[in-house]
Image (spheres, grey):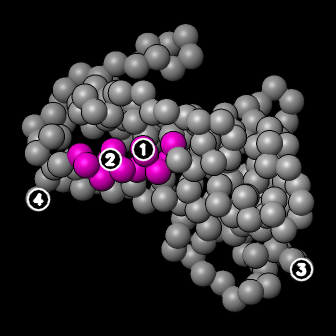
Amino acid sequence: MPIFHETTVPVFIHYLQRLEHMLSCLDAHGSLTGEDRQVLIRRSLAPGMFDLETQARCAIGFSQRAFAPLVPACGAPIEMGEGLSGLIQAAREARHRLEGVAPSELAGKEAHVCRDRAGEAEVVLAATDFIARYALPNFFFHLSMTYAIARAAGVPLGKGDFDGWHAYAPGFSFVGEGDRGGA
């Protein structure tokens, strides 16, 4: 069993699906409330932070940056169209690319040296460390910020919407009325 592939690619695929789901929930929320989707995706948690759209784009980007040094198809730019529909389509395209990565494409590349820029710093790590210690944490950071901004904007998301595993009865709350078990 190609462990390197099995411990990386399916993780990104699963959470790109979750990103698509969360963005679809944001779209549905906009339909129900009449809120402009452009206004929703331009929200951020604090001044000086990226807005939801940029956070989602960064998450999508890290899913591809993780494998770009190892699988050339992942290095090709993803067309990121405008607005919420563009984000959903970009997340879907990133997921489809990773679904096409065969275990054989990563076989024997665990020690391959990968390079990337992290702000002004250069990151140089073996492929397993590059993905586990750099790409995955950055992917989850931006994915979490996307979730947090959507929640702060009133989109009814819970932990199950983020991870796809948790389930709670409607109206359940650990902390009070109206929380969907968002933990």
Of the two numbered discs 3 and 1 in the rendering, the one whose residue sits closer to the viewer: 1
Of the two numbered discs 4 and 1 in the rendering, the one whose residue sits closer to the viewer: 1
Q: Which mark is residue 1?
A: 4
User: Which callout, 3 or 2, points at the residue further toward the start of the chain?
Assistant: 2
Mark 2 = which residue? 98
- Dividing the picture into quadrants, the one containing residue 42 is top right
Report x, y in % for residue 143. 59, 47
Residue drawn 33% across the image and 56% down it: 10
Residue drawn 76% across the image and 76% down it: 180
Relative to 129, is 166 above or below? below
Report x, y in % for residue 86. 60, 42
Amino acid residing under circle 1: Ala
Q: Is residue 71 at least partly visible in the picture?
A: yes
| 30 is within the stretch colored magenta | no
Structural distance between the alpha carbons of marks 3 and 4: 47 Å
Label 2 crowd (10 A; few <14 / some 14-19 / many >=20): many
| Mark 2–mark 1 CB contact (< 8 Å) | yes
Label 4 crowd (10 A; few <14 / some 14-19 / many >=20): few
Q: Which mark is residue 177?
A: 3
- Dividing the picture into quadrants, the one containing residue 110 is top left
| Mark 3–mark 2 CB contact (< 8 Å) | no
Label 1 crowd (10 A; few <14 / some 14-19 / many >=20): many
Q: Is residue 126 at least partly visible in the picture?
A: no
Residue drawn 72% across the image and 75% down it: 181
Mark 1 = which residue? 94
Range drawn in magenta: 90-101
Secondary structure found at label 3: loop
Structural distance between the alpha carbons of marks 3 and 1: 37 Å
Q: Main secondary structure of the magenta part?
A: helix
Work out which residue is located at the far bottom of the displayed protein and give it: 169
Secondary structure found at label 4: loop
